[in-house]
Amino acid sequence: MESSYSIVRDGQLERSTVSFTITSTQSSVSVGDTIQVYGVFHQENAIQANQMVVTPSRNIGYMYVISALAGVWVLSRLLRQWRFDPEHFAVVPRSDPIRLTDRIRRLWARYTDENIDA
Amino acid sequence: MPDLLTHAFIAYIFAMAVSWRYAWLDGRYVTVAMAGAFIPDIAKITLLVADTRVSAFIDLLFSWFGIHTAGGTLLCVFIGVVLVSSQERRRVGWVLSAGAASHLIADAFLMKAYGHSYPLLWPLTAYAPPTPGLYLSTDVWPAIVTGSVAVGVWVIDRRLPKTTYTE
């Protein structure tokens, strides 16, 4: 496998690539997977792996998408429950947080032309 | 890290459970706990500005991973604390810290080839405790498991009599 690395030497950024041969009895890997290896160099650039952990590349997209969704969720909660108070130049909790269910109900009421007391 | 959604669910579950004991800890502070659970992953700035790039610029060894430790996270919590009004600082400080701590602890269970996690208590100690290797960052099941528990907690919370906290 190939591994690229960067080092800082005398304030200069050096990028380089080095090839390793890794021998492991454990996991199977496919192209693009990220691996962690804990093992012994038994000759130059050849590692006998004692432990190897494989992170499959096909799940990395899922991880980023689901993490972004979490960001949207928490950001929406923050914006609905907290507000910036320019008078005190500080973030303060809203005394009456905006509830999504109320908003949707109100929009629905407007859409169906009903009057509800909200 | 497991994905951020798992971290948000973990913070949500614990904050909701604590909210049943302390009336002031309502949905607004549950959100603060969830935001706190995102703090250690500010270290992922490294994907945009690599550690080595900063190192070359400041001419010192540098790693964003410092944010993903007790010390770095605490500094970020302080930033959050000064953003809120003075009456809220104590509560927000505690809740943000708890959320961030839940993230650091959950990440200490990630699978590592070396069998040790990472120096989560830095700069107090650089010791990396052994990890049971429960999951990988890219595993799908932690989000499903914690998400199911979060839904359960949400249902229980709705059935509980509503308490309103007055100052």
Image: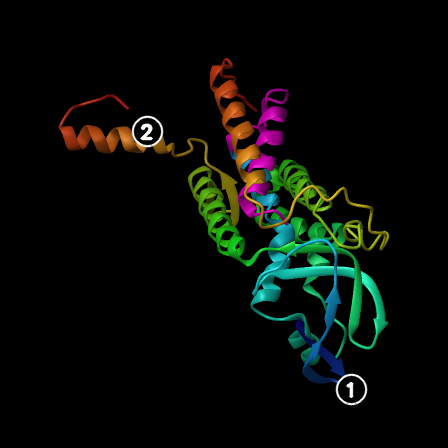
Q: Amino acid at mark 2?
A: Asp
Residue marked by disc 1: A10
Disc ID at residue A102 = 2
> Mark 1 — on which chain does it sit?
A
- Asked if labels 1 and 2 touch by Cβ distance under 8 angstroms, the answer is no
Disc ID at residue B149 = none
x then y, percent, for residue B5: 53, 43
Q: Nearer the viewer, mark 2 or mark 1?
A: 1
Q: Magenta: predominant secondary structure element? A: helix
- In magenta stretch: residue A78: no
Q: Is residue B128 visible?
A: yes
Magenta residues span B1-27
Of residues A26 and B43, the one drawn nearer to the viewer in this rendering: A26
x then y, percent, for residue B138: 58, 50
Of residues A29 and B137, the one drawn nearer to the viewer in this rendering: A29
Label 1, secondary structure: give it: loop
Estimate the spatial distance between the alpha carbons at disc 2 and disc 1, rounded to whole Å. Answer: 61 Å
Q: Residue at x 54, y 22 (%)?
A: B166
x then y, percent, for residue A82: 47, 40
Q: Residue at x 67, y 73 (%)?
A: A3
